[in-house]
């Protein structure tokens, strides 16, 4: 690899080499706080490098892109990693996390997410996806004292391994049908006479199964609530936002390269989107645990994103990218509130939140704002995101799909506002929870600022997205 190619991958190298350095330092100097702060600094440095330095090459090795679209998501996932580590400062110290291993895994995961988002080859898709999935296997079960975390890690490992097998077979079949791994040529070569070749259909079927497991599409979603509940709250924040968002960021580029054959995939994607939105919504209604409710909520949101992906075109792709940013801010913020309340245990059951709005009004108000954004109520980024998704679906003549999405959004008001009512409208004052730390409050402020800014003044972000989508 030439020096120019290495320079073009500078943000990824900062994350990967920095993670290696932190891992080695942790073996000799296991001081937890300095290593955590070092990891935060590396993640921010990677984000700045991606935002400010324009690489000389637009693609490296025919596998990973380094254009504006790839660099945009490198910024997003690097900042997500930085916020995750900020949430882990007190949380990790209280649980005795080994900082060297923990920080390096979070940085490796963000590097994998950035690589996946900018993948221009089927090989790049596989490498990027598996690199951050391998890190998440360990992070989910990182709390050795938690039997729920061990169970969650095992479930994610087993189902993730199954998904990896489907992904590898799907890529192999698509290669057989197209004769190339490079995404633009591979997607263009899948169709003959306007219809997908037989091997292409089989390959896409396996890819859909693998992607369904990775992003919790129904009926491949059953691992999600157990893993969310058992994983440490900061890890759940990274899992629910970055790992799923990176997959859809890559899929935007994949679908942009398909000139024909999408009509044959449309009924399958339509059914997956409807099933994901409705099943996730009705499952969330029955929950009495906040993390499990947010897990089923994430299932529903992946259904919304699938609607935008199916709509396609500039409107659909732009709506998907904006929605991923809006969901990342609100989802990360929601788990940040849970982290800030945690002491020896995480408050997960709804009973723990009954009446706590009187004792912790600011953080409960912030949590209410995040839940309102997830519900899609103005003036939050969630409202703009859902409006863009449904508008793109209607423009693409998927009116029925948009109506299903609107119905799921209306029903979701119940399980989101139920938490708000429990916090602020209970007759009894709730128990006092942990008051949180400065770093946790900073994360809450940044996520709240993003949710409100992109909800009230989304124009600059929408213009930026319009200029970078493939």
Image (tube, rainbow, N blue to C red):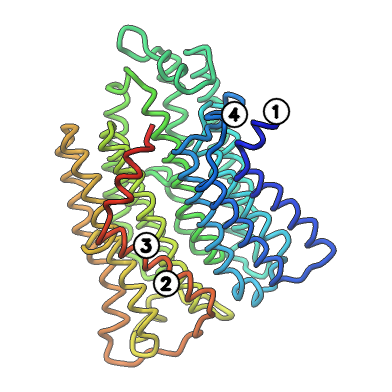
**Mark 2, residues whose alpha carbon is within 10 Å: few (<14), some, or many (≥20)?**
some
Please state if 435 lies on the left or on the right of 379 as rendered: right
Observer-side mark, 1 or 2, equals 1
The residue singled out by tag 1 in the image is: 2
Q: In whole angstroms, how far apart are the C-alphas of marks 3 and 2?
A: 9 Å
The residue singled out by tag 4 in the image is: 60
Q: In whole angstroms, how far apart are the C-alphas of marks 4 and 2?
A: 37 Å
Q: In this view, does 291 lie above or below 222?
A: below
- Name the residue rendered at 85%, 63% in the picture: 28
- Between 15 and 295, the residue placed more toward the observer is 15
Relative image position of residue 64 (x, y in whole percent) = 56, 31
**Mark 3, residues whose alpha carbon is within 10 Å: few (<14), some, or many (≥20)?**
many
How many numbered marks appear?
Answer: 4
Q: Quadrant of residue 288?
A: bottom left
**Sequence-wise first label, 3 or 1:** 1
The residue singled out by tag 2 in the image is: 445
| Callouts 3 and 2 close, C-beta under 8 Å | no
Task: Check disc 3 and report its element: helix, strand or loop.
Answer: helix
The residue singled out by tag 3 in the image is: 450
Observer-side mark, 1 or 4, equals 1
**Sequence-wise first label, 4 or 2:** 4
**Sequence-wise first label, 1 or 2:** 1
Relative image position of residue 368 (x, y in whole percent) = 31, 73
In what quadrant of the picture does the C terminus appear? top left
- Name the residue rendered at 18%, 52% in the picture: 407
Q: In whole angstroms, how far apart are the C-alphas of marks 3 and 4?
A: 32 Å
| Callouts 3 and 4 close, C-beta under 8 Å | no
- Name the residue rendered at 21%, 38% in the picture: 393
- Name the residue rendered at 38%, 49% in the picture: 324
- Between 180 and 443, the residue placed more toward the observer is 443
Relative image position of residue 464 (x, y in whole percent) = 35, 44
Q: In which quarter of the image is residue 312?
A: top left
């Amino acid at each position: 690899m030439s020096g120019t190619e290495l320079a073009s991958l500078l943000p990824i190298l900062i994350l990967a080499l920095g993670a290696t350095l932190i891992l080695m330092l942790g073996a000799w100097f296991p001081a937890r706080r300095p290593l955590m702060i070092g990891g935060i600094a590396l993640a921010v440095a990677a984000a700045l490098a991606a935002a400010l330095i324009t690489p000389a090459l637009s693609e490296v090795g025919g596998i990973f892109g380094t254009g504006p679209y790839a660099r945009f998501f490198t910024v997003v996932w690097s900042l997500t990693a930085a916020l995750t580590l900020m949430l882990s400062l007190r949380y990790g110290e209280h649980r005795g996390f080994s900082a060297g291993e923990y920080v390096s895994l979070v940085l490796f995961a963000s590097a994998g997410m950035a690589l996946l988002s900018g993948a221009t080859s089927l090989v790049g898709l596989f490498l990027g996806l598996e690199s951050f999935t391998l890190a998440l296997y360990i992070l989910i079960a990182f709390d050795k004292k938690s039997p729920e975390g061990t169970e969650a890690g095992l479930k994610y490992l087993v189902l993730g391994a199954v998904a990896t097998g489907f992904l590898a077979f799907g890529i192999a079949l698509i290669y057989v049908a197209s004769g190339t791994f490079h995404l633009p040529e591979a997607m263009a070569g899948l169709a003959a006479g306007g219809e997908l070749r037989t091997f292409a259909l089989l390959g896409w079927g396996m890819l859909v199964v693998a992607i369904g497991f990775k992003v919790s599409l129904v009926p491949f979603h059953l691992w999600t609530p157990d893993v969310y509940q058992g994983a440490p709250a900061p890890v759940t924040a990274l899992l629910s936002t970055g790992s799923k968002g990176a997959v859809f960021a890559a899929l935007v580029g994949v679908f942009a390269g398909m000139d024909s054959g999408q009509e044959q995939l449309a009924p399958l994607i339509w059914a997956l989107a409807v099933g994901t939105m409705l099943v996730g919504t009705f499952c969330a209604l029955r929950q009495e645990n906040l993390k499990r409710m947010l897990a089923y909520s994430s299932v529903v949101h992946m259904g919304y994103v699938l609607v935008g992906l199916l709509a396609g075109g500039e409107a659909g792709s732009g709506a998907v990218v904006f929605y991923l940013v809006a969901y990342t801010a609100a989802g990360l913020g929601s788990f940040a509130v849970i982290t800030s309340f945690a002491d020896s245990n995480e408050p997960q059951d709804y009973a723990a939140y009954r009446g706590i709005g009187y004792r912790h009004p600011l953080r409960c108000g912030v949590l209410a704002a995040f839940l309102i954004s997830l519900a899609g109520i103005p003036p939050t980024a969630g409202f703009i995101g859902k409006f863009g998704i449904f508008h793109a679906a209607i423009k693409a003549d998927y009116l029925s799909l948009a109506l299903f999405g609107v119905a799921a959004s209306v029903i979701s008001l119940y399980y989101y506002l139920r938490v708000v009512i429990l916090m602020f409208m209970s007759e009894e004052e709730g128990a006092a929870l942990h008051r949180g730390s400065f770093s946790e409050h900073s994360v809450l402020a940044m996520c709240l600022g993003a949710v409100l800014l992109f909800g009230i003044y989304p124009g600059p972000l929408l213009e930026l997205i319009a200029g970078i989508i493939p």
